[in-house]
Image: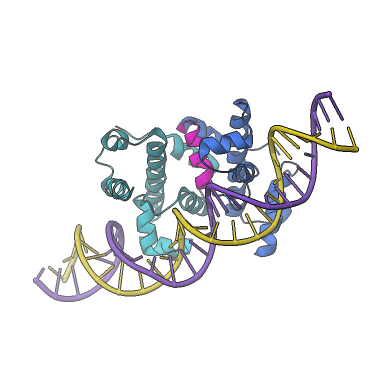
Chain colours: A cyan, B blue, C yellow, D purple
DNA sequence: TGACAACATGTCAGATCTGACATAACCTTA
DNA sequence: TAAGGTTATGTCAGATCTGACATGTTGTCA
């Protein structure tokens, strides 16, 4: 449990270099779906931030959070929930339609 | 804060009778988007359960939760997070595409 | 009407998440 | 290389969420 958390974590941090989280770690379907979904939301958040030329510290102010929390959000750290990610995107004005797109867009393998 | 929570709560419990959560309570855009999103997920969960002819107690077993928690999920109670709702749907085999559809499908006014 | 199954609501201890702080690692540019 | 701006990682107290239990409500059927 602890070990796997760590693995997930490192994986998400580097993340993008790995084609499939699942086959590498042998996670269950739900687990991998959850993680990959989180990563998509994380990436979307980062994109939005960059498009607006904001630093993590700037965004933290907007979201009433902290720079470190933003950093963790953007790498899909296990300590951040989908809830926080989605709420953050909503605060940034993401529409349901966009959210929907983010969620269904599958990551290139 | 407390008052509003209660209002939201009752509203979500009865919920379906109200056209727009927002204009009734004057919530901010994010707040209402969040609540309405939660309600869509909640409804989707209930639909899935019913399609499978399961009682809330049955579903609780599958999800390793309790009947009362399922009930709260299905009415979008403030005490349940998007995280729990989404994880539950994923456990029930909901695909990204379906999830995406649930999220973007706007509720009839 | 009573009995029963299903669903809703209230509460709470323990689990998990969050903002904040400290600090490290990374990049530019001078 | 030093300084400065940005991002990453570790930690933790307080906030929030969760499963479980108790109890209340609703609907159905005999």
Relative vertical location of residue C6 with respect to residue A5 in this rendering, above or below: above
Residue D5 x/y as whole percent? 29, 67
Note whether residue B25 is visible: yes
- The residue sitting at 51% across, 40% down in the picture is B64
- The residue sitting at 56% across, 35% down in the picture is B102
Looking at the rendering, in which quadrant would you find the C terminus of chain B? top right
Looking at the rendering, in which quadrant would you find the N terminus of chain B? bottom right
Q: Nearer the viewer, residue A22 or B63?
A: B63
Question: What residue range appears in magenta?
Answer: B82-96
- The residue sitting at 37% across, 51% down in the picture is A78
Residue C10 appears left or right of A1: right
Note whether residue B105 is visible: no
- The residue sitting at 42% across, 40% down in the picture is A34
Quarter assignment of residue A39: top left
Q: Nearer the viewer, residue B91 or B63?
A: B63
Whether the magenta-drawn stretch holds residue B89 is answered as yes
Residue B98 x/y as whole percent? 51, 31
How many numbered dots are placed on residues in this image?
0
Whether the magenta-drawn stretch holds residue A30 is answered as no
Residue A43 appears left or right of B72: left
Residue D18 x/y as whole percent? 53, 49
Residue B8 x/y as whole percent? 68, 54
Magenta part, dominant SS = helix
Residue B9 appears left or right of A106: right
């Amino acid at each position: 449990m602890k070990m796997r958390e760590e693995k997930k974590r490192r994986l998400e941090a580097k993340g993008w270099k790995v084609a499939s989280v699942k086959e590498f770690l042998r996670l269950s379907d739900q687990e991998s779906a959850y993680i990959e979904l989180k990563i998509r939301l994380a990436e979307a958040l980062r994109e939005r931030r960059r498009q607006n030329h904001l630093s993590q510290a700037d965004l933290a102010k907007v979201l009433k959070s902290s720079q470190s929390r933003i950093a963790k959000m953007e790498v899909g750290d296990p300590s951040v929930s989908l809830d926080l990610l989605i709420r953050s995107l909503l605060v940034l004005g993401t529409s349901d339609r966009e959210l929907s797109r983010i969620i269904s867009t599958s990551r290139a393998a």
